[in-house]
Image (cartoon, helix red, strand yellow):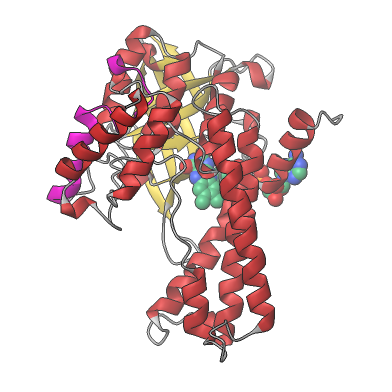
Amino acid sequence: MSTLDHFRSETRAWLENHCPPGARGPGTIPLGSTTIPLDNDTRLWLTRMAERGWTVPTWPKAYGGAELDRDQYQVLIEELKRVGARTPLTGRGVNYIGPTILEYGTEAQKAKWLPRCARGEGAWAMGYSEPGAGSDLANLSCRAELVGDNYLINGSKIWTSDATDCDYIFVLVRTSPEKPKHEGISLVLVDMHQPGVKVSPIRLISGVSPFCETYFDNAIVPAEDLIGGVDNGWSVGKRLLQFERSTHAGINISGSQGGRVEESKLPKLLRDYLGTDDKGRIDDPHLRSWLTNFEMNTHAQRITQKRAIEEMQSRAPGFTSSAVKLTNALNIQDGDELLMAATGSQGLRWDAETADPKQLAILRNWLYQKSLTIAGGTKEVQLNIIAKRVLGLPD
Ligand SMILES: Cc1cc2nc3c(=O)[nH]c(=O)nc-3n(C[C@H](O)[C@H](O)[C@H](O)COP(=O)(O)OP(=O)(O)OC[C@H]3O[C@@H](n4cnc5c(N)ncnc54)[C@H](O)[C@@H]3O)c2cc1C
């Protein structure tokens, strides 16, 4: 038996014995938030997987990982899928700031923050965008001033997803306003449980409120929690964005979700809405052909994701993440449009009192997922990156 086969059989046996029934199938995937309660099985699953280093399987053992190589990682993902296990932990700790600290943190910062991320002790928000700094992120004005051993943070961040349920926020701040804009920025880690941090939710057209505005009024950050060096935040922050984009693209293998493929619900939903003809095919030739195209594009996307994961030398690909994030978002939005077309004018009913809950969910999902070509950098920004950094076109 090869070493990899041995690893597979051990992994299979362990998962069968240790994945609780309540952690199999659809359900909650923890973000590590201290304010969102978890049911017993979900909590137990997180604890067991963290003890084994499998919440962050590719990280070094010293920081809470299991040091799996790419082949072992792939086996773990396949075996998790085989038992129907949910990802034990997700979020910006495992997927964004953790791998960034791994690359840019000092030994002391790694020892302090990474095991917490790996165990899901605290959920993380992302403090990048400001009202005047979205695509033009380097325009940010949130300030950090060193006073004694601490930075005092003043300013605000907008579109901070999940901030009401988060314990920490990583924030891009201006440390040297006198320098050119890209050169005076730093990345700091802020504890949100302090009087200097206030969070105000923003309600969306989709009916939910997934993001917030976060205000800093003399919020305190120990100087030791500035990551990657003073005024080096533009490089550190851009690397973090690659981890974010690779997560959106489905190719981040920092946590244990990378490359997992869920079955598409679209064909069944289309059959439910449209019915089938006498040959059992979806009963509308135009939508049937649209579905065929969608399924082919989805398959191509999956193959591309798999190839990107296999080609990865480190924990996140560079500019590939922009391309795969963009095609992934466009493909998902195409599926949403197709489903909306299938539901017809019924699908546009907004009134929550009278609308069919299933249709309302489709409608809200369609609206929400329009954000996929905005969040993590807009479609135009990704196209600019691809043009400049991948294709080498002039500015
Ligand atoms: C669901 C969701 C979650 C988010 N979560 C977070 C979060 O947790 N933390 C956080 O910090 N931010 C978050 N954001 C904010 C997101 O990063 C910004 O919305 C995004 O970067 C765009 O910035 P903006 O909204 O200021 O738009 P703008 O930058 O003002 O862009 C407006 C339009 O102009 C276009 N444009 C701008 N510059 C160029 C250019 N150079 N070339 C061509 N076109 C251009 C854009 O593509 C866009 O169409 C989130 C956004 C969404 C939708």
Q: Is residue 115 visible?
A: yes
Quarter assignment of residue 64: top left
Quarter assignment of residue 333: bottom right
Q: Which residues are magenta?
A: 39-62
* Spot occupied by residue 34 in the image (x, y as percentages of width and height): 22, 40
**Above or below, 129 relative to 334:** above
The residue that appears at 34% across and 48% down in the rendered structure is 81
**Viewport quadrant of the N terminus:** top left
* Spot occupied by residue 279 in the image (x, y as percentages of width and height): 57, 87
**Viewport quadrant of the C terminus:** top right
The residue that appears at 58% across and 65% down in the rendered structure is 335
Foreground of the two, 385 or 133: 385
Quarter assignment of residue 62: top left
Foreground of the two, 5 or 72: 5
Residue at the far right: name it: 394
Q: Is residue 131 visible?
A: no
Residue at the far left: name it: 40
The residue that appears at 55% across and 27% down in the rendered structure is 312
Residue at the far front: name it: 1
Q: How many marks?
A: 0
Q: Is residue 384 left or right of residue 197?
A: right
* Spot occupied by residue 300 in the image (x, y as percentages of width and height): 63, 51
Foreground of the two, 290 or 206: 290
Foreground of the two, 70 or 230: 70
**Above or below, 3 relative to 379:** above
Q: Is residue 165 left or right of residue 298?
A: left
The residue that appears at 54% across and 59% down in the rendered structure is 369
- Residue 182 lies in magenta, yes or no? no
State which image quarter holds ligand 1. top right
